[in-house]
Image: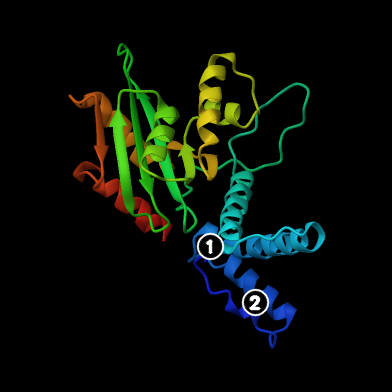
């Protein structure tokens, strides 16, 4: 379910200590993606919460729901471990979180989810803004992509929903927008834009908004820049375009 063998956890002949040692060995295995190294701990946490919900609240949870919650838990945990840089204020102490490094890799979503990386590009003297977005699965496989001269995340949301995706991680490199969406800054200029995004958010079954540096957003960045050079107002790709192949392959090679 999470990409690593966990059958050992259900073996009654293996002690709890040995099971925990196994999980820590997985967590320290640099050959695995950070998602696969972290998710087994969240599997245990979610199973425990599901059990308590059944015992104390008499609410059952389907396997599909448990799986989605595990993905959400893991993504949120990783996002809080490596969020955007803290916002300096005069009334609060600096956050203790570590900012993401520019050497971080693009990370695939959990199985059953897709990730939509998006970006916008602006050229001085040009009133148009280029948008690029790319949707990939848990194997890093290109599913859909698009580029055009529109607003950034809003069109990525619309396109993902129209294509039938309902469990989506949206990831971009705009700290300003990311902070506004997570209520960590008050930006009147973005208020209507954020409200529009939040309205679309309710139409998805499961959704996350992540921040990453441009280095981990290279595919969407290339699409956004290409949009400003293209004679077309908008382009939708169901097959990875040739000019994007190197960037997609590079993300896959660095993530698996």
Q: Which of marks 1 and 2 is nearer the N terminus?
A: 2
Which of the two residues, 200 or 182, is positioned nearer the viewer here?
200
In the picture, which quadrant includes the C terminus?
bottom left
Q: Mark 1 or mark 2: which is in front? A: 2
Label ID, residue 13: none
For residue 182, what is the image quadrant?
top right
Check the image and name the residue furthest to the bottom.
Answer: 13
Q: Residue at x 72, y 33 (%)?
A: 94
**Residue 129, visible in the rendered structure:** yes
Q: Is residue 129 left or right of residue 242?
A: right
Which of the two residues, 70 or 16, is positioned nearer the viewer here?
70
Location of residue 98 in the rendering, given as x and y in whole percent from the top left corner: 63, 43
Location of residue 38 in the rendering, given as x and y in whole percent from the top left corner: 60, 60
Colour option used: rainbow
Q: Considering the numbered disc 1 on the image, is that residue within a helix, a strand or a loop? A: helix
Q: In this view, does 196 lie to the left or right of 56?
A: left
Q: In this view, does 74 lie to the left or right of 193?
A: right
Q: Which residue is drawn at 30% across and 13% down?
A: 126
Q: Considering the numbered disc 2 on the image, is that residue within a helix, a strand or a loop? A: helix
Alpha-carbon neighbours of circle 1 within 10 Å: few (<14), some, or many (≥20)? some
The relative height of residue 66 versus residue 188 in the rendered view (above or below) is below
For residue 144, what is the image quadrant?
top left
Residue where numbered disc 2 is placed:
9
Residue where numbered disc 1 is placed:
36
Q: Residue at x 50, y 32 (%)?
A: 200
The relative height of residue 179 versus residue 126 in the rendered view (above or below) is below
């Amino acid at each position: 379910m999470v990409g690593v063998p966990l059958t050992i956890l259900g073996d009654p002949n293996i002690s709890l200590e040995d099971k925990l040692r196994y999980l820590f060995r997985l967590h320290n295995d640099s050959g695995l993606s950070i998602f696969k190294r972290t998710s087994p701990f969240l599997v245990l946490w979610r199973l425990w919460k599901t059990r308590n919900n059944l015992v104390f609240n008499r609410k059952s949870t389907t396997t599909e729901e448990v799986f989605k919650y595990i993905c959400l838990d893991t993504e949120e945990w990783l996002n809080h471990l490596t969020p955007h840089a803290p916002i300096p204020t005069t009334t609060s102490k600096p956050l203790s979180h570590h900012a993401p490094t520019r050497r971080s890799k693009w990370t695939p979503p959990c199985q059953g989810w897709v990730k939509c990386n998006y970006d916008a590009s602006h050229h001085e003297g040009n009133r148009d803004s280029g948008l690029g977005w790319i949707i990939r699965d848990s194997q890093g496989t290109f599913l859909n992509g698009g580029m055009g001269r529109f607003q950034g995340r809003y069109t990525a949301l619309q396109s993902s929903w129209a294509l039938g995706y309902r469990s989506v991680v949206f990831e971009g490199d705009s700290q300003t927008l990311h902070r506004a969406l997570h209520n960590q800054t008050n930006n009147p200029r973005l208020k209507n834009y954020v409200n529009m995004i939040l309205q679309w958010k309710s139409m998805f079954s499961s959704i996350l908004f992540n921040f990453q540096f441009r280095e981990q957003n290279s595919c969407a960045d290339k699409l956004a820049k290409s949009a400003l050079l293209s004679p077309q107002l908008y382009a939708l790709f169901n097959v990875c375009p040739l000019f994007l192949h190197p960037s997609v392959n590079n993300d896959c090679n660095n993530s698996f």
